[in-house]
Amino acid sequence: MRFVCDRDTFAKEIAIAQDIIASKNAFSIMSNVYLEVIDSRLIIKATDAKVGFETEIPVSDSEPGAITVFCDKLLAITNSIPEGDMILEQHDSVIEIKTLSKNVRFQLKTIAGDKYPVIPDIEDNQYFPLRARDLRKMISQTIFSVSNDETRFFMNGVFIEKLPENELVMVATDGRRLAYMSIEEGNIPDFRPAIIPPKVLSVILKRASDEGQIYMAISEKNIFFRFGNYQLTSYLIEGRFPNYQKVIPQNQRQKFSVSKDELLSALRRVSLFVERSNKVIFDISRRGLVIKSEETELGAAREELSCEYDGDDVVIFLNLRYLEDPLKVMDSENITIEFSDPSRAITLRPEPASNYFHVMMPIQQP
């Protein structure tokens, strides 16, 4: 096998492959990236046995063949060499890496390509298009609410389902908070509701643009995405996702509106005195919103914000991170916080209301 390609183009794809690969054991094929030359194309594959990645780039002066190479070291070498064209050429069980511009040469041992794990695939006619902007927004509005408690594995991913009238819904929860977003998209085929691991969704957020479409397909055990030259696949989490409809608050009687940026800035300042409890105090009245930390040996923080509120005075204890995570991705200038009782769930919504919202439980006081 042999090919010549642009260093920057190659490095970009190998960096994505390294994001996918979980192992850094130089002697395991699971730490390797798969390289195959066909005609004037280099096919690149990576997998951690759960998430798979495939792309291709143009190459020249090529000879066909397939090998696997330790990805971590290949990326380090590629990033270290000068810009411009690079040459990769196989000699028995070694691949030689060199440049045209300088007398730089590396050698890496390889493992045969036929030993690489098979990445699941699905027929082309199973894919359906989604607007890239919509899918990326759905992911960004939900992914941070995924639970990392492995004993509740059915909440370790983002739930996706199709509702009537071609409404696509994504939901994530860790049992203390919930993130929800829906979109209306034409011609979505019926599919079984699924729980998507966050790793593949993170790759989409990092690598896909807002332009164009992302194609998605779902089988019994896997989910597949295509955009640009990329193909991604991931196993689906087995289990029954909680009935999220039951925990979405209804008819919350009280609410107040506040500037999102002012609230986020105030939380960052107050956080200087928030300790391991992650607790912030919201004191809400018709005079405005007061955000406080608990008093510590070092002191305390307090900040007042103007807000629109027409109800009884109330104090709510909230988790700082649960507030900051959604505020960072909400795309409205103002937000509305709805509640019915300081001990029950609150709801964050953009103002005006849109197709997403965030629910969180307050911190209960002893």
Image: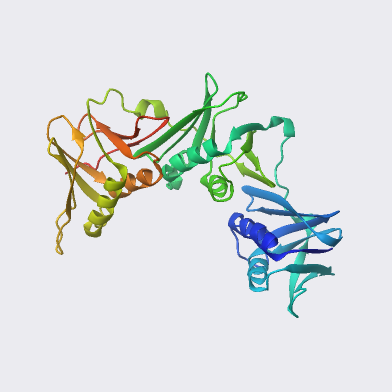
Any part of residue 91 in sight: yes
| Residue 185: % across, % down | 56, 26
Count of numbered tags: 0
At 65% from the left edge and 42% from the top edge, which residue is drawn? 227
114 shown above or below 348? below
For image coordinates 85% across by 61% down, the residue present is: 62
Q: Quadrant of residue 133?
A: top right
Where is residue 364, by image quadrant? top left
Up-down relation of residue 255 to residue 202 (above or below) = above
Nearest to the observer: residue 166 or residue 213: 213
Q: Closer to the camera, 100 or 250?
A: 100
Q: Is residue 77 left or right of residue 139?
A: right
In the image, residue 124 sits, relative to residue 48, either above or below, namely: above
Mark yes or no: residue 278 visible: no
Quadrant containing the C terminus in the rendered view: top left
Seen as rendered, the residue at the extreme bottom is 103
Residue at screen point 69% across, 30% down: 126
User: In x, y percent, where is residue 150?
Assistant: 45, 47
Give the quadrant of the N terminus: bottom right
Is 86 located above or below residue 187 in the figure? Answer: below
- Residue extending furthest toward the front: 333
Percent x, y of residue 148: 43, 48
Q: Position of residue 165 (x, y in %)?
A: 53, 19
Q: Indicate how the structure is coloured in the image.
A: rainbow
Q: Residue furthest top?
A: 165
